[in-house]
Amino acid sequence: MDTSELYLGAWRALGGSLSKPFLLPAHHLVTHGVVVGMTGSGKTGLLTVLVEEALRAEVPVLVIDVKGDLPNLLLAFPTFAPAELLPWAEASTHATDRRPRDQMAAALADDRQRGLAGWSIGEAELSAFSASTLIRVVTPGATAGELLHVLSSLERRSDRWEHDRESARAALSAAVSLVLRLLGRDPDPAKSREHVLLSVLAERRLSMGQSADIGALLEDIANPPITQIGALDIEAFFPRRARRELAAALNTLLASPTFASWRTGATLDIGAWMTPQGGRTPAVVVSVAHLDDDERALVLGVLLEEVLTWVRSLPGSQRLRALVVFDEVYGFLPPHPANPPTKRPLVALMKQARAFGVGVVVATQNPMDLDYRALGNAGLWWLGRLQTDADRERVLDGLALGGQGDLSEELGLTLQRLAPRWFVMRDVHAGDGATLMQPRWAMSFMRGPMTRSEIQRALATRRAAEEERGRGMDVNGTAAVHGGRSA
Amino acid sequence: MTQSDPSQDNVQVPRFRDAYQSLLSEIRAVPSNALITINLDIPLGVTTALGALPEIRALRPRVVAEMPQLDVIRFDKLEAYTLAMGHAHALYMAASSPAEALDEISETATKLREMLFSDAAALAQRNIIDGERLKQLKGAHGFRNLAFDLFVLAAMLRDNWSKISSRTALQLKELDQAETLADRILTSVGQREQGPGVVAEAAEIRQHAFTLFVSAYDHARRAVSFLRWNEEDVDEIAPSLYAGRTTGRKKTPDTQVARPPTAADPKAPVGGEVPKPAATNGGTSAPTGVGMPQSEPFLSR
């Protein structure tokens, strides 16, 4: 297969009756994409296929997973052996299904094989995909997946302070907001004097090449190395007693085992994440389904600032060199005047990432709460079944804002009647007009939202399988048909 | 015939105005970032919603039993939101329309009054309904009298609907229309008498009311869609408010509603090339159905 094209499924003309295989040129994703569809419309399946095909085209992918679905990428089993599906059988069948687990697994394996065969995907393709890709799941603040040092930009000095102070400052601000949120204090950089104090002290240290970890900042809070903040004397801005209280709270946080989980793990280094490992194309799934709404917004704000900084460091390219997929973007890219910490970097990515060959695909089941001006640049739109008239009208109005032409009222009726797993697609690269598009079956077993323990189980199974493959054996203990490479 | 204020007579307070007044604080409280742009014909939408209410309400026991997460309070308030919408629209039209618009409304209202009176009189003559209330009518001269008569006739016919529905060509939506027009007339007259309306405030309140109305109708329609999923008759029970924006073609099960692209032949969405078939593995023949190639892209009716 031509690796510069992504086999996403099938397409047909509006009003047509015959579907044909749909191969999307990878570079079309450089102009970004938007997927909109209600629950059950097939949106997550489409995203999963997009990620799989990007990986097959050797394009690394960063996946932001809010609902817990995209760790299903861990379940792209390389064979149709029922044993692979045994741990997932009960949870994946109806509650009234009383068959023994092995029978359920066999039935699921058979469905998977027949479904993928319908899309001309067999074990050869599954095995090749498994061997050539590296799926990682990062779970900030939780040990289900890989831990992440979310406060890297605060506690680990970066050379950005020399050549890109603005983005370094933005990343620092996001990290300080997260700390304050964990303290239960106001994380808003525009309103919180705690934020101002911590940011000023941390920036001073980082600018001088010193570490700004919490312990060092505690000392500076108690005995400030500065006399003024803004136009005010520091005692007037933040009196000693209040500083002592803040220091005490920070110390308690520092001692907390929970806080340790935010400062443990890999450095937030997007460039390293997107680099092939052992010849395998990486997909890093940052799953935040386990966090509450505020924590999610702050963690993802930190993450997206880092993504933006990394993108700006790349040379220009028209080729798709990386893909960022965000499922579900509701609440993170709202219309004006809402301004969560994720909005600024997301808007910037939608505007600027194209020049560096980085595509962004966002998905939502709630089209009412989107900043359509930010999405107006998106070159690819997939519109799935939407539940309400208001949702359909909102999306069609939003498309018109992007200057992509008037979509007819009949298109609105088309959306109303769409079956699950069908989308109306518009691709600016393919000219005017819309077509119908149907994603193929995903190679990943679509288990649905995964709990933390399920993520742990899937990662453990994958590690065991890779170790077996490394020894030339498959999961059943027989000689492997397709030998894998060790990681 | 002399003009009189209907509120001085023993007539049921116009329900549109009543609903509006009772919901005004809630209408005003809709946050600006939640507002929906007005994008449909409001009188038509109000009439549609009022017409659908009986069948929607008939599903309420199932909503309570089968959809515990649904906001039943909002479901129950659909009628109030609809009536309030009608009145907010009337206020806006009164504030923003030129004086001649009242004459246009009254012309339509007069014809409707004649039709309702004719049917009511015929039914009263045959003792199917009590004709006493017809004596309250004031005649079509004067805007207030016209509005009053419409309210009385609509209420009279609605109260006896179970007895007369099989004996008259009238439809319930015509009674709704009569009330809507009467409300608009009274509102316009009231605005005219008070001086120039405050257009901006009326527009803002109308948009707020529209947001509540459309959201509540969508909420109810979603419930109907869920409960009637297998029967697929949501459009018959709770028609789309936006149906009036189409070409007006009646949809049949075989109607292809999507227009093909303007190109002579459907163009491959990948730069004009014929897409290559994916590699085959000679495996089992694929089942048909959801998610499989050549499956039907539209829900069947």
Image (spheres, coloured by chain):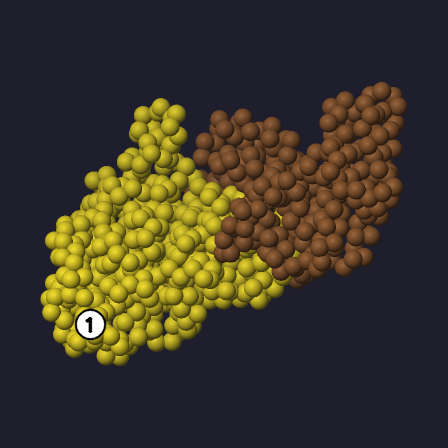
Residue B99 picture location, percent across and down: 78, 57
Camera-side residue: A317 or B163?
Answer: B163
Is A403 situated left or right of B259 in this image? left
Residue B62 lies, in percent from the top left, at 53, 27
Q: Residue furthest bottom?
A: A163
Between residues A468 and B192, which one lies in front from this camera angle?
Answer: B192
Q: Residue at x 29, y 63 (%)?
A: A192
Please state the chain letter of the residue tagged with numbered disc 1 in the rendered image. A
Find numbered disc 1 in the image and state the secondary structure of the residue it sits on.
helix
For label 1, the residue is A234
Residue A6 position (above or below residue B69)? below
Is A223 situated left or right of A6 in this image?
left
Whether residue A269 is visible here, answered yes or no, is: no
Q: Colour of chain B?
A: brown
- Horizontally, is B76 left or right of A349 in the view? right
Going by the image, does B172 lie left or right of A331? right
Residue A355 drawn above or below residue A363: below
Chain A, colour shown: yellow
Residue A423, image x, y percentages? 53, 50
Q: Amino acid at mark 1?
A: Ile
Foreground residue, B19 or B75?
A: B19
Residue at horizontal 14 percent and vertical 71 percent from the top: A224
Image quadrant containing the N terminus of chain B? top right
Q: Residues within 10 Å of mark 1 (few under 14, many from 20)?
A: some
